[in-house]
Amino acid sequence: MYWADRVAKEIIDSGKFKPYWVDDMFTPSGYAHIGNLRGPLVHDLIYKALKRAGSDARFTFVINDFDPIDGLPEDLQKDFSKYLGFPLKKAPSPKEDFASFGDYFADDFKKVLASLEVKPRYYSSWDLYHEGKFDEAIKIALDNADKIQDIYQKVSGSKKKEAGWLPLQVICENCGRIGTTRVHDWDGETVAYTCEESLVKWAEGCGFEGRISPFGGNGKLPWKVDWPAHWMVIGVTVEGAGKDHSSAGGSRDIARELCKEVFHIDEPYDLPYEFFLIGGKKMASSKGLGLKARDFKQLLPPELARFLFSRTDYRQAVEFDPIGTMAIPDLFDEYDRCYKEKTFLPRFRDIVNYVQMPNVDVLKKYEEIKGGELTEVEINIINERIKYAKIWLEKYAPDEFKIQLSEVLPEKVKELTEDQKQFLKKSIDLIEKNNDPEDLQLALYNLTKELKIDAKKAFSAVYISLIGKEFGPKAAWFLLSYPKEEITKRLKEVIE
Ligand SMILES: [Zn+2]
């Protein structure tokens, strides 16, 4: 049974978690990295599996745009440092056409998700707070501040209790920052706050002291409380997070206790998903390591990108190391193997070879192979694979896969034996006489018999002479894909 269907069945069979409301979240503080896609994909796959099982399910996604800016991508550090500590929704957009910093990066992420067929209903955390949807949760949290601190201590063993601590941060009325305010003295209607100079390392508060209502968007719960609070506010029944949040004493354990002891709701079904690893390294947006999610569409067609996530159970790490490896051609092969429709899928590796042969028209080639006209669907698939084969060759392929007639005589020709040179010398005639690759291939093969030379050794002489490598694509097709005079000139040079 497919893993997402198994999870959906488990959710349904439990009789709990109704109505089925799947939710996930993202903080738009910079461009998402490929690793950030795992959460949305896992949740989307569960949502679709619940629907497939005949249930009525919903899928929402919260954009945490009320969070403070607590770090910046390198290129924005100069101009945006003054906005550190501001809510993401209150700093300007780095690019035109967007209302805020948070809107810009949220929009970018939404576009990537849409290209992967992940289309939840989006909520803005800023809007939910400003519409008053969190007011009740804020009141509960403030009324239970001591209990919440006790839970933090008990579950995560965090530092000792701070007198008067309240689980809230408000926007400073003087400087507009939220990341720098310490809130205290809840009187049932308002809270007091100080905008502290050194509350956090990444932003500096202005020193202002004030008193304000905690409701209606003036303040926000800290993330560990906000998470279970938003389950209550929205009615979420299925939501997981990366396994780093799910370790013992981590934010999931705290959220579970808060559900039970403070908000009095059932904890949603958990999906502690494993990491997405690029060459064995965890992808984290803060480290700037690896690929941006928005660049994914330049790496793989959307259906392959989706397949990369969907094929692996959420409890296993997805390992993907596309640079200088066969990971991408292997992924195509696996995709083709799992593909259940009856459309013809040209093998990615073959296309990689064809696109490197200047005289080969790939579409014509497949018409020949098929022995008839290609359908529109087939043409689209071939064209898409041509596009990604070219990208792969240019950016990711191991060197031995780049097969192009070398511009200068390869060094390696010095290693050719007399046998091999003899083979090349006699090949020149055959190349000049034959125009059909099948005929030429057979003729070259017969020549190896005639000269009593090992066929592998003979053909490697061809590859060494033309591309400097010991192996390559089918010799005759490759030879005939270039103007004959170019090839024979090269071979003559080699045997001189
Ligand atoms: Zn301030």
Image (cartoon, rainbow, N blue to C red):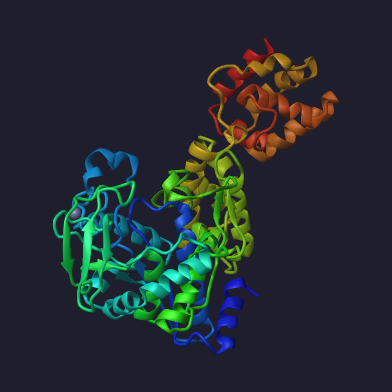
Is 329 above or below relative to 152?
above
Identify the residue at horizontal 68%, vertical 17% (top origin). Answer: 413
Q: Which quadrant is home to the N terminus? A: bottom right
Rendered location of residue 129, percent (x, y): 25, 72
Image quadrant where residue 88 sits = bottom left
Which quarter of the image is occupied by the C terminus? top right
Q: Residue furthest left?
A: 174
> Would residue 301 be seen by someone viewing this image from the given angle?
no
Above or below, 200 against 460 in this view is below
Question: Hey, which residue is sitting farthest right in the picture?
Answer: 452
For image coordinates 60% across by 57% down, the residue present is 317
**Above or below, comparing residue 49 to residue 196 in the picture:** below
Of the pair 146 and 356, the residue shown nearer to us: 146
Q: Is residue 496 left or right of residue 87?
A: right
Front residue of this view, candidates 66 and 218: 218
Q: Nearer the viewer, residue 186 or 229?
A: 186
Q: Position of residue 207 (x, y in %)?
A: 19, 52
Q: What is the x, y in percent for residue 376?
A: 45, 61
Q: For this view, does 93 lie left or right of residue 333?
A: left
In this figure, what is the number of numbered marks?
A: 0
Please tell me in which quarter of the rendered image ligand 1 is found. Answer: bottom left
